[in-house]
Image (cartoon, grey):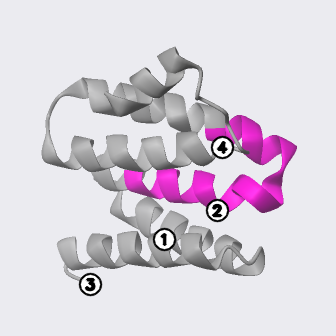
Amino acid sequence: NFAQKRHETGFDVPFYGMADFFDGLSFLAMAHQSSDQKWILSANESISNIDHFAKVSPSNCEHKLLLLQAEMKSIMGEVEEASNKYELAISAAERNEFIHEQAIANERAAEFFLRNGD
């Protein structure tokens, strides 16, 4: 597990949740493909860490938290809540000028809507 190795080597510098954000997206992608609960547990840890950063620096992390929450809602089959979180994540990323992360949110939302027939 790359995230675990990074943490063990001491290169786990948070940069306002960047590592947790991308780890969380990776864990959630694995959770979509596997029934192994370890991915959900790892994703929940990343979401918890991002939640902390979002409270300290909302303009840097709110959209990250919303996107991870949307992905989790998608996995849990909570379609309406997931849809709402994707839209909020895209809006927050745009508002705070995180264009590259807005693109990621749009991509994840598009895949969600395709999967759910919208």
Residue at numbered disc 3:
118
Q: Nearer the viewer, mark 4 or mark 3?
A: 4
Q: Main secondary structure of the magenta part?
A: helix
Circle nearer the N terminus (4, 3): 4
Per the rendering, the mark at residue 63 is 2
Q: Amino acid at mark 1?
A: Ala
- What separation in Å lies between label 4 and label 3 (alpha carbons)? 31 Å
| Residue occupying the point 84% across, 50% down | 57
| Residue occupying the point 28% across, 50% down | 29
Residue at numbered disc 1:
105
61 or 3: nearer the eye? 3
Q: Is residue 84 magenta?
A: no
117 or 45: nearer the eye? 45
- What separation in Å lies between label 1 and label 4 (alpha carbons)? 16 Å
Considering every residue shown, the one lying at the far top of the view is: 8
Question: Residue 81: x percent and y percent?
Answer: 46, 60
- What separation in Å lies between label 4 and label 2 (alpha carbons)? 11 Å
Assign a secondary structure to mark 1. Answer: helix
Above or below, 66 against 87 in this view is above
| Residue occupying the point 43% across, 70% down | 83
- What separation in Å lies between label 1 and label 2 (alpha carbons)? 9 Å
Circle nearer the N terminus (3, 1): 1
Q: Place residue 74 in its image quadrant.
A: bottom left
Assign a secondary structure to mark 2. Answer: helix
Q: Nearer the viewer, mark 3 or mark 1?
A: 1
Residue at numbered disc 4:
17
